[in-house]
Image (spheres, rainbow, N blue to C red):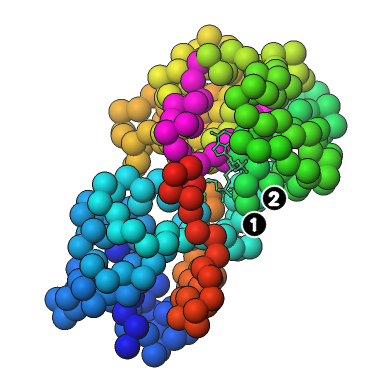
Amino acid sequence: MTKLALVISRWDPQPWIDRFAHLAPELNVCKWPDDDTPPEDIDYALAWQPPDGVLAGFANLKAIFSLGAGVDHILREPKLPDVPLVRVVDPDLTMRMSEYVCLHVLMHHRQQRLMDADQANTDWTERPQWSASAMRVGVMGLGELGRDAAEKLVHLGFQVNGWSNSAKQIDGVTSFAGKGELDAFLGASDILVCLLPHTPDTHAILNRDLFRKLKTDGPLGAPVLINAGRGKLQVEADILASLDAGELGAVTLDVFETEPLPADSRLWHHPGVTLTPHNAADSDPEALCKYILGQIRRHEAGETLQNVVDRGAGY
Ligand code: NDP
Ligand code: OXD
């Protein structure tokens, strides 16, 4: 019998176990550690922030599945078995992220946080509103998530640019690629949306030097940052310094250098910060177990796995 181990920290494994039991009762799916199963019997590991060393202990693994789109939480394991590492690419997850990006781009564009504060002060200030076409949104990372979000922002009427390693052709989106075009991309961004993976190349990329290159003469008066990629892409001390100096007008952050965000972080209470608890695009067992089962069935039938991570690139 094919054996799957759920190696999960911080999430409840039970909904995954229940969903697999419903969809594929022929599989043996256990929460790891499991007293009844020796590690060498495990065929597939399904991981979210796996504890150090666990994956290395599965001697006969056929593949590792990340239970999210990102894989940094798995690649940090120094002795990762040399088997395919598959990540989530699924319309459910993609749509959730695009909802988040559109919500927060629109919230900043329409100055909703300022009007929330006005309401709290019984203050009828008539704030001017601009059309979306007056706003330039730059999307860092034009992969599965960035591309979909960029397309939806185009449909909302924003001017949209994107930045990625390789140049892209996406209707309505101006593509910038590589380090050589980063400054031009930043200089054209009123609202910067980050959907990059965390890799050695992107570590701490969202820093004060970068913020100072953003467009400063847009309708909002100062640029806005939205980061739903990974916390280790950002330097939080720099975000706070740039907010205090007016180099950034506001930020939305879904991800943090340390998660959960420590209670003493100034980000919690800064008026320029909107934050969410790393739930921009939740991994939903309902949707994702189906995707993973499809991949396992392909593999067992001798077909190639899809969405296998390039370990050298780190995403
Ligand atoms: P993809 O791998 O599909 O896309 C990554 C994109 O980033 C690609 O366009 C890639 O360029 C670009 N990129 C990577 N490195 C660089 C670099 N050094 N310079 C420029 N561009 C670079 O990933 P997804 O879109 O599926 O997901 C992106 C990230 O979103 C995940 O890695 C994860 O960290 C985060 N995430 C966060 C969630 C949340 O709830 N907050 C939920 C899901 C994901 P190219 O196309 O040229 O290769
Ligand atoms: C993911 C995440 O990588 O939820 O999917 O962060």
Q: Nearer the viewer, mark 2 or mark 1?
A: 2
The answer to which image quadrant residue 131 occupies is top right
Q: Secondary structure at mark 2?
A: helix
- Left or right: 278, with 212 as reference point: left
Answer whether residue 229 is visible to the viewer in this image: yes
Assess whether residue 43 is covered by the magenta stretch.
Answer: no
- Left or right: 309, with 213 as reference point: left
The answer to which image quadrant residue 6 occupies is bottom left
The residue under label 2 is which amino acid type?
Answer: Asp
- Left or right: 127, with 58 as reference point: right
Residue segment shown in magenta: 190-208
Q: Label 1: which residue? A: 95
For this rendering, which residue is in front, 84 or 20? 84
250 is higher (above) or lower (below) than 226: above
72 is higher (above) or lower (below) than 23: above
Residue at 32% x, 75% y is: 43
